[in-house]
Image (cartoon, rainbow, N blue to C red):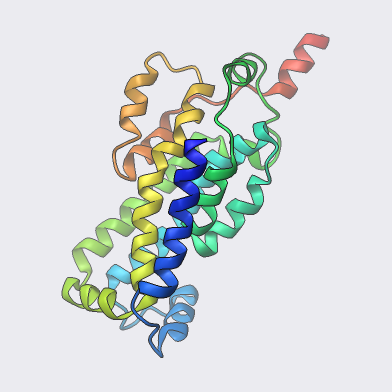
Amino acid sequence: MWNKIVFGALWLGFISYAFFLAPPDRPDTLQLIIDLSTGKWTGINPLIIALFNLMGILPMVYACLILIDGKIQQLPAGLFSAISFGVGAFAILPYLAIRQSLSGAQVERVRSNGIDRGGIIKLVDSRWLGVVLTIGASILLIYGITQGNWPDFVSQWQTSRFIHVMSLDFCLLILLLPVAIADDINLRHFTNPQTIKLLSWLPLFGALIYLCIRPNLIDATNTSTQELV
């Protein structure tokens, strides 16, 4: 219950801040978004380029967590995940508010019987996807930090609603990752889950490392086939 109140209040507060307290939009915002989306990056601060592209990687990280969670809870996690690629935490927060923490019975059922790992679930459960996301995030962070113009970024953060809200969205998504990871850890067979939970609190890379090392879930389809045989 408290999770629903906290995440719901945080969602409403973030929406209110973004629309009423963040700096106003700049006339060139739409063109900037188009240029960032189409790869026309000449003249754009590398920090902004890196941040924009990281905001594409973070929803993929969440997809690796909430699509599996939604499969267990029967929530339309795919819808929230798809929308998060455009609006980030504005879509993730309501999902975290609506979802129920997994019961002990649900966790044991998945750990024993598995889930259907067909289609997209097999992809997001793959450790190779975690490796790809880790490499991509690392390249973007190195590029942005080493090549970026920090004074220019601070200036744009203070004067552009798009840059301002996107930066806060990025930070919020990172802060929420341990919450999204918590139940996923319980579903898997770790020898030392407490250490993994501590790892998940490492900003961004804790989640990325987690996706690279987590054991695959048992495939319920294969389990059922073996039982029939």
Picture quadrant of residue 201: top left
Could you tell me which residue is drawn at 40 percent across and 13 percent down?
191
Instruction: Estimate the x, y position of residue 189 in percent, counting from the top left.
Output: 49, 17
Q: Is residue 103 left or right of residue 211?
A: right
Picture quadrant of residue 20: bottom left
The vertical placement of 80 against 70, above or below, is below
Instruction: Estimate the x, y position of residue 88 in percent, counting from the top left.
Output: 48, 58
Could you tell me which residue is drawn at 63 percent across and 21 percent down?
106
Could you tell me which residue is drawn at 51 percent across and 30 percent down?
184
The vertical placement of 76 against 170, above or below, is above
Instruction: Estimate the x, y position of residue 196 in percent, counting from the top left.
Output: 36, 25
State the residue in front, 11 or 146: 11
Instruction: Estimate the x, y position of residue 49 in percent, counting from the top left.
Output: 35, 70
Q: Is residue 228 left or right of residue 199?
A: right
The vertical placement of 81 against 156, above or below, is above
Q: Residue furthest bottom?
A: 27
Residue 61 seen in the figure = no
The vertical placement of 16 against 24, above or below, is above
Q: Is residue 132 left or right of residue 152?
A: right
Q: Quadrant of the C terminus?
A: top right
State the residue in front, 123 or 210: 210
